[in-house]
């Protein structure tokens, strides 16, 4: 058990990669607060976990990721709920975009910056106020932060920014003993990808050196490593989990 006694918050923890991180953290002995965008989605995810393991130390919260002070209060409440301090903050919530440049609207640029960049920064700022020495921040980046994508420039733009936040804050918070890293998943079979027909998945998988798309658990395992003391001297890393796509 790599995370025994640790308390973690995972934003975007109600489904997809975030839910897989929540489940793996619980398996490794952590107490976990998962954030949903609404109280109902957070509660539904908590209930699905409790249905499998009624004793799981999990709670659902839904702070506005756009509001740093609300996040900070939520982080304090989570620490209090689990009777100790907060150790791990995962800023995972995000959206993607695929709009061609000519069709982009200012509102679309704003929304991807608000959710994928400002929310991550807010989560890091709130974490920096609550975490103590030994604390860990992990942000979800993407393989497109290395290779771009052919349409929807806002998405890789936002993930380049996530890498910038991660690397800079590793330097700023390192002297306080707080590690800051990112995981950069490749194509991962969350609900949206997993529901695509085989003929759409195959050409995607064929382009990946490992010849398959990632499973949410593949990605979640990298978060476990970075959150654990196994990574005690790792900070400022952007760890690819993409089957070799960006090699
Ligand atoms: P998903 O759509 O299944 O989950 C996204 C999560 O973010 C949900 O829990 C959702 O509630 C939350 N969220 C979105 N907007 C929010 C908002 N405004 N306020 C609060 N919560 C909000 O997607 P996913 O594939 O699990 O993606 C999770 C992260 O992984 C994202 O940052 C995404 O960019 C990144 N990522 C995904 C892939 C992939 O192939 N699935 C690849 C690379 C990176």
Image (cartoon, rainbow, N blue to C red):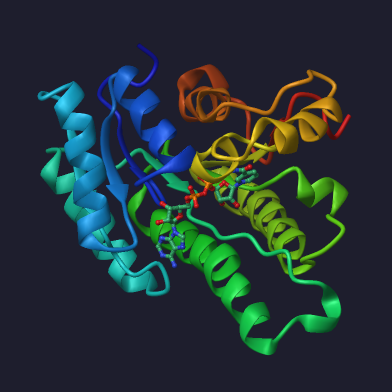
Q: Position of residue 50 (x, y in %)?
A: 16, 30
Examine the rendered structure and indicate whether residue 121 appears above or below residue 1: below
Q: Position of residue 4 (x, y in %)?
A: 29, 19
Q: Nearer the viewer, residue 127 or 201?
A: 201
Examine the rendered structure and indicate whether residue 147 appears above or below residue 199: below
Residue at 77% in and 66% down: 152
Residue 85 in view (yes/no)? no
Q: Nearer the viewer, residue 31 or 76?
A: 31
> Which image quarter: residue 222?
top right
Q: Nearer the viewer, residue 235 or 224?
A: 224
Residue at 18% in and 43% down: 59
Residue at 60% in and 66% down: 117
Examine the rendered structure and indicate whether residue 245 appears above or below residue 231: below
**In-image side of 83 versus 173 (left or right):** left
The C terminus - image quarter:
top right
Residue 187 in view (yes/no)? yes
Q: Nearer the viewer, residue 132 or 201?
A: 201
> Which image quarter: residue 49?
top left
**In-image side of 126 versus 184 (left or right):** left
């Amino acid at each position: 058990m790599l995370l025994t006694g640790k308390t973690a918050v995972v934003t975007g923890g109600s489904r997809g990669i975030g839910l897989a991180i929540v489940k793996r953290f619980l398996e490794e002995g952590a107490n976990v607060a998962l954030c949903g965008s609404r109280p109902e989605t957070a509660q539904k995810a908590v209930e699905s976990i409790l249905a499998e393991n009624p004793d799981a130390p999990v709670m659902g919260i839904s702070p506005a990721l756009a509001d740093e002070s609300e996040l900070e209060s939520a982080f304090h409440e989570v620490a209090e709920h689990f009777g100790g301090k907060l150790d791990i903050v995962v800023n995972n919530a995000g959206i993607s975009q695929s709009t061609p440049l000519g069709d982009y609207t200012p509102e679309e640029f704003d929304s991807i910056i608000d959710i994928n960049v400002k929310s991550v920064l807010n989560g890091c700022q709130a974490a920096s106020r609550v975490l103590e020495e030994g604390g860990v921040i992990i942000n979800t980046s993407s393989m497109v932060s290395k290779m771009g994508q052919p349409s929807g420039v806002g998405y890789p733009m936002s993930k380049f920014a996530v890498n910038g936040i991660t690397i800079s804050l590793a330097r700023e918070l390192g002297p306080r003993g707080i590690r800051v890293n990112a995981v950069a998943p490749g194509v991962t079979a969350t609900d949206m990808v997993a529901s695509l027909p085989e003929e759409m998945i195959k050409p995607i998988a064929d382009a990946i050196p490992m010849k398959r798309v990632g499973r949410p658990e593949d990605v979640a395992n990298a978060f476990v490593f970075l959150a654990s003391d196994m990574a005690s001297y790792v900070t400022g890393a952007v760890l690819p989990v993409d089957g070799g796509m960006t090699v």
